[in-house]
Image: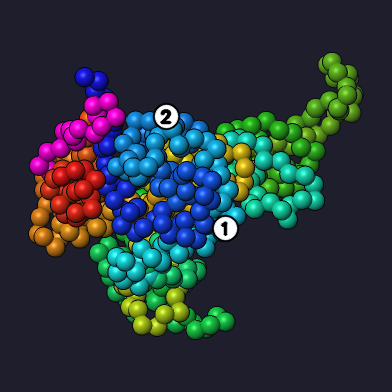
Amino acid sequence: MEYSSKSLDHLGIVAGVCKEIELAAEIDRIVGIDKRQKVTTGESVEAMILNALGFVSKPLYLFPEFMKTKPVELLIGNHLSWKDFNDDTLGRSLDRLYETGTEETFLQIAINAYKKYGFRGRFLHHDTTTFSVHGEYEHAEGDLDAVPIEVTYGHSKDNRPDLKQFVTSLIMSKELLKISDLKDMKQTSLDGYSLLSTEIVYGVKQRWIVVFSQKAYERESKTLKKSITKEREAVERLLWHFSNDDFYCKEDALAALEEMAREWKYHKVKNVAIEESRKKKEGNVGRPKKNENLQIMCSVTSSFEEDDEKIKKVFFRKGKFILATNDDKMSDEEVLKTYKDQQSVERGFRFLKDPLFFAHSIFLKNESRIIALVMIMGLALMIYSIAQRKLREALLRENQAIPDQTGKPTKKPTMRRVFQVFEGITVLYEKETRVMIMNLNDIHRKILALFGNRYERIYCV
């Protein structure tokens, strides 16, 4: 008997969500099907999402190696083999996605999912981040209009100034708020926050809310104290060196001291003493001759102290930020709560930049393919979010729980934790025939039952 096995792990859940929202079928409807190709664009996208959510750090150029270890017939379709997913297949799919329009394609898929699962969020949150790329991305002069995006150097949030980068934006469910800046102002509190608000007209009638966070104040104050100490040590060194400098007159010396002190953020000059000395004129060497006309030089010795007024003003600004909205129906507390939900976008970016996510470093050498890949990254995040929401709602509806990392029951597991639970599930084959799914236990079966029949069928439960 010749036996072999392939890793199914958590990918059956990922595939289940893809099929539930008819991802491949919708992409093929939008992009079209080339009858000469065995693998459609939609099926290629499904495969790339499986790779993205596989958390195995296999970049796209090692894609066949990734697919070889997976039960393709269960995850994508019986008519396909791992050998069908090569570099050319993926490249053509990325090209077709770009040519069709990545924004339009993504939007249509997202709208379908929104309708299917009955999302009811009032707000949308938007933010941007950068991704680093490996490659030159040089363009012929005068041909910039033909370039889909500009991949270039710039401020790197990933601390990789040596790499070129591009910016991507992410919008997540919840109604958009317009954020602005400012001061002055009915007072309320919300779990460690204090709010002051006022209505103003600045082009449009709006409400500005100054928010004070005690935790943020304590954190920022600690950082400020360190900065004050650091500057004090620097000023001490500067004044020591300055006292050894010579000036031709008192006015020049005081002007130089004033210019130097202007750079200090938290300190000021206290006492100043000017000393005069006679020295040989510049260019003359050796001991002074009798009756030689010596140059009168000035040097400055100065002490310093903390600038209490400046420091007080800086401390006063700590722990505060300003929100602005033209929504006249939301309370101050609702505005703050909605703003704090912005963290959902930031968590999304952390997810996309995870070292185990397939786009942590982007090696594609073609801008249009980068754009298509970013769309697939967004789809992967959407699939992950749908799976997590679906499981949590089922746990709440059925009044059940599953063990967390410590073994305690939880109704709000993360999908990353669920993915870890499913690690080690394999498919056993006798030659080319699937025999059984191995290593399924009661927790797996419980989770699959909560997801539904489609998911149970993938795991042959």
Which residue was labeled with disc 2? 65
**Given the current orientation, which residue lies at the most extreme top position?**
286
Q: Residue at x 35, y 66 (%)?
A: 114
Q: Quadrant of the C terminus?
A: top left
Quadrant of residue 118 within the rendered picture: bottom left
Q: Secondary structure beneath disc 2?
A: helix
Q: Is residue 431 magenta?
A: yes
Callout 2, which amino acid? Glu
Where is residue 282? Give x, y as percent.
86, 27
Q: Is residue 116 visible?
A: yes
Residue 186, compared with residue 230, is above or below; it is below
Which one is nearer the viewer's eye here, 103 or 144?
A: 103
Which one is nearer the viewer's eye here, 356 or 125?
A: 356
Reading the chain from its start, which is encountered first: label 2 or label 1?
A: 2
Q: Quadrant of the N terminus?
A: top left
Q: Residue at x 62, y 46 (%)?
A: 367
Q: Residue at x 54, y 46 (%)?
A: 36
Callout 1, which amino acid? Thr
Where is residue 257? Give x, y as percent.
67, 44
Res. 418 mark: none
Which one is nearer the viewer's eye here, 340 or 33?
A: 33
Q: Could you tell me if the residues under marks 2 and 1 are in contact, i.e. CB atoms within 8 Å?
A: no
Q: Secondary structure beneath disc 1?
A: helix
Q: Is residue 135 magenta?
A: no
Where is residue 201? Give x, y as percent.
52, 83
Which residue was labeled with disc 1? 100
